[in-house]
Amino acid sequence: MAHAAPVEAQQTSTDLTVLLRTPLRQLSTEQVRPLVRRIVEDRDRAEAVDVAAFNSAI
């Protein structure tokens, strides 16, 4: 049985797709900022989970 990706990961994938497939001159700063913010927040959340798992393993 396949597991569904977390909502944050699905959103990050969608955000990255928008950024990669859309010429940047077609996106305004107001459109880009929330996409990048969500991507960075998801990365930070994933890193925090990795650190917590590592610390609990020590």
Image (cartoon, rainbow, N blue to C red):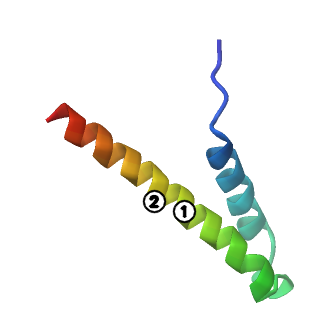
User: In the rendered image of this protein, does residue 43 appear above or below residue 7?
Assistant: below
- Write the residue at 24% across / 40% down: 54
In the image, residue 47 above or below residue 38? above
50 with respect to 40 (left or right): left
Quadrant in which residue 15 is drawn: bottom right
* Residue 46 in picture, x, y percent from top left: 45, 49
* Residue named by callout 1: 41
State the residue lying farthest toward the right: 26
Total count of labels: 2
Q: Is mark 1 on a helix, strand or loop?
A: helix
Q: Is residue 6 left or right of residue 41?
A: right
Kindly give the residue lying farthest to the top in the view shown. Answer: 1
Q: Which of 12 and 21 is in front in this view?
A: 12
Q: Which amino acid does label 1 sit on?
A: Glu
Bin the neighbour count of mark 2 within 10 Å (Cα to Cα): few under 14, some 14-19, many 20 and up. Answer: few
Question: Which quadrant of the rendered structure holds the N terminus?
Answer: top right
- The answer to whether mark 2 and mark 1 are in CB contact below 8 A is yes
Residue drawn 81% across the image and 86% down it = 28
Q: In which quarter of the image is residue 39?
A: bottom right
Residue 34 location, x and y as percent? 71, 73
Give the residue at mark 2. Answer: 44
From the image, which quarter does the C terminus lie in?
top left
The structure residue drawn at horizontal position 63% and vertical position 23%, both measured from the top left corner, is: 3
The Cα–Cα distance between marks 2 and 1, rounded to whole angstroms, is 5 Å
Q: Which residue is drawn at 38% across and 52% down?
A: 48
Q: Residue 21: percent from the left, percent from the top? A: 78, 66
Q: Against 24, is 57 above or below?
A: above
Crowd around label 1: few <14 · some 14–19 · many ≥20 (10 Å): few
Query: Which percent across, then down, holds residue 45?
Result: 47, 53
Query: What's the amino acid at mark 2?
Result: Asp
Depth check: 40 or 14 in front? 40
